[in-house]
Amino acid sequence: MPSPRPQFWAILAAQVVWGIGYTFVSGAAEAWVTDEVGESAVQPIFTRAHQVSLGMTVVGILAAGLLGQVALVWPIAVGGAGFVLLGGVMGFLMREENFTPTPVGDRDTWGHLWATTKEGVRAATRHRVIRTFLIVGLLAGLTSEVFDRLWVDRIINVIGLPSLGSGDDTATWFTLFALASALIGLISSVLANRLAPVALNAEHPTRVMATLVLAQVAGVAVFALSGNLATALAGKWSRDAAQSISWPVARAWLNRTITNPGSRATTLSIMGQADAVGQVVGGPGLGVVASRAGVQTALLVAAAVQVPAAILFARLRPRRSGERGEWSA
């Protein structure tokens, strides 16, 4: 069955709707979980949720591969229907036992929105840990945008893919790459949490986060410098594994730091917007570098840009007073 001919306006409209929807979701799920279970209990939950997500990613890739054999539009259509179904199910299942709505007579929608936004911005700019995450988000967004867009180009046009004799070798190879990435991320997360649970569950995992960021930098650099497929994939998958381990650790640390539940979702959303700004700013800029100096150079610059993120994490130190939320360089 042939796929319908893509229409630019439809793709653009879908991206706009997706972007608006994601803005509402960004930060809300983590804030909801933290409010329901408490700040001290979120790290194991975030870790398990991330592991389940990776496991289901494997299932999704296999299902998408099968559906794609019928028509490429089907994986996208079924994925969209899945999100609609998820929203409906969660509308019935999500409980908010620790949420206290504002009395109807006291509701001032725009005033409350403005106050919450100001509180979120204040937390993101005044607290050293949150401010560090804001800067790290900018750097991570810049690096991820470049790597996510250019790694495929480098493999196809520079390194090359062996022939599988299956017709569409490129689609087959990248399906296998996606499966391997999800499995490696899942295994890395499980092993790391079994071998180093104390370090990953630490209240102030500064060294862990700095190390994981450096691992991502090294992975991108190895990928950029490698001239053969095996080494390049080792670099990419090392980066993916470090990201898989660091995501729940970073989210738990950030949620423990945000002490005002009323502005938690807004503050987390601001973190997401920092990542988005990094992608918007860094993507075109390093795209120009790639077009003029080569993809390898752009990837190496992207790796170097993320090095300060490791330094920022390593420099964070709790003040000797021991007061929660008091940090210094």
Image (cartoon, rainbow, N blue to C red):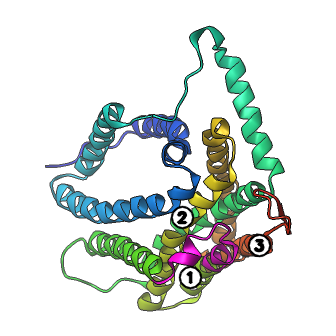
For label 3, the residue is: 308
Choose top left, top right, bottom left or bottom right for residue 290.
Answer: bottom right
Q: Which residue is drawn at 61% across and 80% down?
A: 296
For label 2, the residue is: 247
Q: Magenta residues, as a range?
A: 195-213
Choose top left, top right, bottom left or bottom right for residue 185.
Answer: bottom left
At mark 2, the secondary structure is helix
Find the distance from the CA under tag 2 to the CA under tag 3.
18 Å
- Magenta: main secondary structure equals helix
Residue 5 shown left or right of residue 110 in the figure: left
Mark found first going from the N terminus, 2 or 1: 1
Relative height, residue 71 to residue 211 (above, below): above
The amino acid sitting under disc 1 is Gly
Q: From where the camera sits, is residue 232 visible?
A: yes
Marking on residue 219 = 1
Residue 202 painted magenta: yes
Q: From where the camera sits, is residue 283 visible?
A: no
Q: Nearer the observer, disc 2 or disc 3?
A: 2
Choose top left, top right, bottom left or bottom right for residue 70.
Answer: bottom left
Q: Residue at x 23, y 83 (%)?
A: 164
Q: Nearer the observer, disc 2 or disc 1?
A: 2
At mark 3, the secondary structure is helix
